[in-house]
Amino acid sequence: MSEPDIEGRSDLKVVLQFFIVPLSLVAVLVIVFFGLQMLRSRRPDAGATLDGLRHYEGFLAPYVGDVKRWQSGYDLSLLLRSEDRQARSRVLPDLVSAFREAGELRDLKLRRYLALALGQNGDARAAAALREGAHDGDAQTRLFSVWGLMQAGGAPACPELRAAAADPDRGVRAMAVFALGALGDRSSEPVLRAALQDRETDVRWNAALALARLGDPAAVPVLIQMLDAPGAPAGARGEGAPREGDAALNAIRGLALLRAPEGRQPLARLAASAPDLRIREAARLAIDAYGAAPRPGAP
């Protein structure tokens, strides 16, 4: 091989090593970057997500189909928060069908997510399916269905919520009494007063707060007990759980609404000596509210 040939090949090797290969890598990275940007710019669609949830196919379906459906159900419950009323109305019939199908197939995780999605939908036509869910054999499905009835059922859902206040599961009972207070259902006051004697702390607390919303002084003894609560009820852990002191803050708001004379002294004690500055300030404002005209509100 001649010397010019050797030099030519060396030059080609240098070009490949220092120009062609790096440029190729840069081109691949640019393509990947713009591809990801396009995927990010595509807004998820509730209808497409629901369709994918019900008809997921592919060669991996036998292996990851359940996980894909669960993820789609969770995504759907989030998507419906931002959809407009017209879009929510369009997907409702298929959403109800998917919820019932999940029950027939005993796909508990999917059914729970779809109960959340029905509540997020907020359409009163979802109430019939949520009433069915409130009687499901799975406690989590009942819990999410009761929450959904609060969001979508309105006043007509109150009889179902009153029944749920006697559910065997503590979480369902707590959600039911909370919902009755949130909906302002005064005919539920006897149920809420009975819940003040529940064996579970969070049910009693929610019942007291619900009664405070309704202006019922029967809540006062439990509200005063809540002032000294060290934190969240037992079992409330993880992201989204109440912070330490939240129970006391809610109780202070409830006492401020009721302006019960027996609440003034405990509030004065907190205003003077509570370690938590949030609680101290809230107690001070609540005492000031005792001298103001009553006003409707919610703790």
Image (cartoon, rainbow, N blue to C red):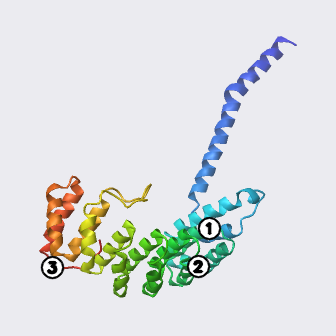
Q: Quadrant of residue 104?
A: bottom right
Q: Is residue 136 left or right of residue 265?
A: right
Residue labelled with disc 2: 92
Earlier-in-chain disc, 2 versus 1 = 2
Query: Relative to 71, does residue 106 appear above or below in the rendering?
Result: below
Q: What residue is drawn where x is 37% and y is 76%?
A: 195
Lower position in the chain sequence, tag 1 or tag 3: 1
The residue tagged 1 is: 108
Task: Give the alpha-carbon distance from disc 1 to disc 3, as whole Å.
Answer: 49 Å
- C-beta proximity under 8 Å, tags 2 and 1: no
Q: Give, as a three-letter code, the residue at label 1.
A: Leu
Residue density around tag 2, few if under 14, some if 14–19, many if 20 or more, within 10 Å: some
**In this figure, what is the number of numbered marks?**
3
How much space separates mark 3 and mark 2, taking CA atoms?
44 Å
Element type at mark 3: loop
Q: Amino acid at mark 2?
A: Leu
Image quadrant occupied by the C terminus = bottom left
Identified at 11% across, 74% down, the residue is 291
Along the line of sight, the residue nearer the viewer: 40 or 5:
40
Q: Quadrant of residue 44?
A: bottom right
Q: Nearer the viewer, mark 1 or mark 3?
A: 1
Amino acid carrying label 3: it is: Ala
Does dot 2 land on a helix, a strand or a loop? helix
In the rendered view, does 2 fall on the left or right side of 173? right
Residue 135 in which image quadrant: bottom right
Q: Describe residue 84's horizontal placement relative to residue 215 as left or right.
A: right
Q: Position of residue 24 (x, y in %)?
A: 69, 36
Residue that appears at 23% across and 59% down: 279
Q: Position of residue 131 (x, y in %)?
A: 54, 81
